[in-house]
Amino acid sequence: MIYMLSFLSGLLSLGIEVLWVRMFSFAAQSVPQAFSFTLACFLTGIAVGAYFGKRICRSRFVDIPFIGQCFLWAGIADFLILGAAWLLTGFSGFVHHAGIFITLSAVVRGLIFPLVHHVGTDGNKSGRQVSNVYFANVAGSALGPVLIGFVILDFLSTQQIYLLICLISAAVPLFCTLFQKSLRLNAVSVAVSLMFGILMFLLPDSVFQNIADRPDRLIENKHGIVAVYHRDGDKVVYGANVYDGAYNTDVFNSVNGIERAYLLPSLKSGIRRIFVVGLSTGSWARVLSAIPEMQSMIVAEINPAYRSLIADEPQIAPLLQDKRVEIVLDDGRKWLRRHPDEKFDLILMNTTWYWRAYSTNLLSAEFLKQVQSHLTPDGIVMFNTTHSPHAFATAVHSIPYAYRYGHMVVGSATPVVFPNKELLKQRLSRLIWPESGRHVFDSSTVDAAAQKVVSRMLIQMTEPSAGAEVITDDNMIVEYKYGRGI
């Protein structure tokens, strides 16, 4: 029994930590500092809890039923902490208050293991016994994050798993009192466990709903959290609580700057193979699917939630039935590395905000070099800098011919010529929706569409702006040195 309690102590403690990382990262819009902040708070709480656990061992008699009571109170405390977090999610200071919640949660979890160790080695302090108690705790600590992060989050929401941990904690006394019958403790344990079990399904995601400002739809899985909002007649998508795009292919309702997508078939004819990093709303890929000579498009997307959302959008959904389009659930950079011989006429990366965690993977000089190795001799790459001067500087450093189009970069190994208005109209008028054969623009709209595309100029960049630095895999400057922070 003592080994099981040691195992559960590690499993539930590290499980709670994983969930707090997820909640805090979501509230902080997935900045990279969120993980280190959560870890610092949690380790502080564990240390404080261990200190109080030691004092309890010295001040009173500790046995297995008492440890069961501590698990029960830890479950109740975690529930109350979650409730306090829920009450504050509507306030701007939630991110800073979260540090208190994380620390308190770790304190109530941290005091348990010293009690378990004390009972487990009482009367037998041999190295083997101490090792067995620690091994069980380490095994639980290792299994908790893996089980939650890779398996359970595909079936339950973060809040449901949090309440499940509270439920398991509250149920532990039922097994501990096998050594000492306690009807009162058992009754409390059963009642609290039932309450947590009911709340798991009555309130599956209320904390995230509050943090995300009550979206119209919220999808959560192990890959992340995607929210959809209806705003002024448009449907806007947020990934990890950050703007990700809008469902729109209409250049005359450019709520999502979709004219940037229409630029690409205007710059180059003969685009047959396309690679897109990130599906998001699917709007950009949908526009590119209208290129009549396109033979194949591979879209790499990590989170399957985006694909399921697209199925409900009439203007984007035909993309899923287009036999030329393959959506792979994979990391774009990893996919390119595993397919070194693949070549494309166009690679598009409508990159997320530069200050988010892992943005370096798509903005670094190393990755831009890798992308160029997958382009045909006159192929084009386009990516979003999200206004980062360092992303522009990296493009100038890494791509032979780099051009600025608004806050996008267009790059190639050969010069890219911005077409005159007549050629632009000619290329736009060739675009056809594949499922219907209907032209995207007719003679009455193509002139206005061309005007939208040329509203931004394609400007060649030869030198980076003053003070801008090159992003590399090692320096990660857009995430840390010049990142937004917490």
Image (spheres, helix red, strand yellow):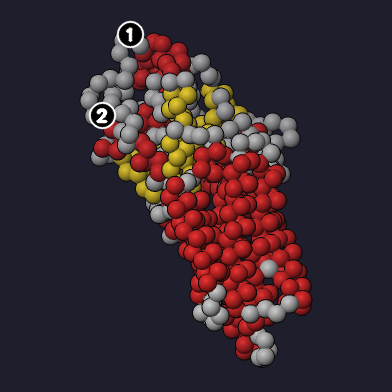
Q: Amino acid at mark 1?
A: Ser
In the rendered image, the vertical position of residue 242 relative to residue 156, given as above or below:
above
Q: Residue at x 25, y 29 (%)?
A: 434
Which residue is at the front of the view, 77 or 309?
77
Which residue is at the front of the view, 322 or 335?
322
Left or right, 361 with respect to 296, comes to right
Q: Quadrant of residue 449?
A: top left
**Residue topped by disc 2:** 434
**Residue topped by disc 1:** 444
Q: Secondary structure at mark 2?
A: loop
- Comes first in the chain, label 2 or label 1: 2
Q: Residue at x 54, y 19 (%)?
A: 457
Image coordinates for residue 482, horizontal then vertical, percent = 70, 40
- The C terminus, quarter of image: top right
| The disc label shown at residue 306, or none | none
Q: Residue at x 27, y 36 (%)?
A: 322
Q: Can residue 383 be seen in this snapshot?
A: no
Left or right, 397 with respect to 156, comes to right
Q: Amino acid at mark 2?
A: Pro
Say few, some or many: other residues with alpha carbon within 10 Å of mark 1 (under 14 / 14 to 19 / 20 or more): few
In the rendered image, the vertical position of residue 351 relative to residue 204, given as above or below:
above
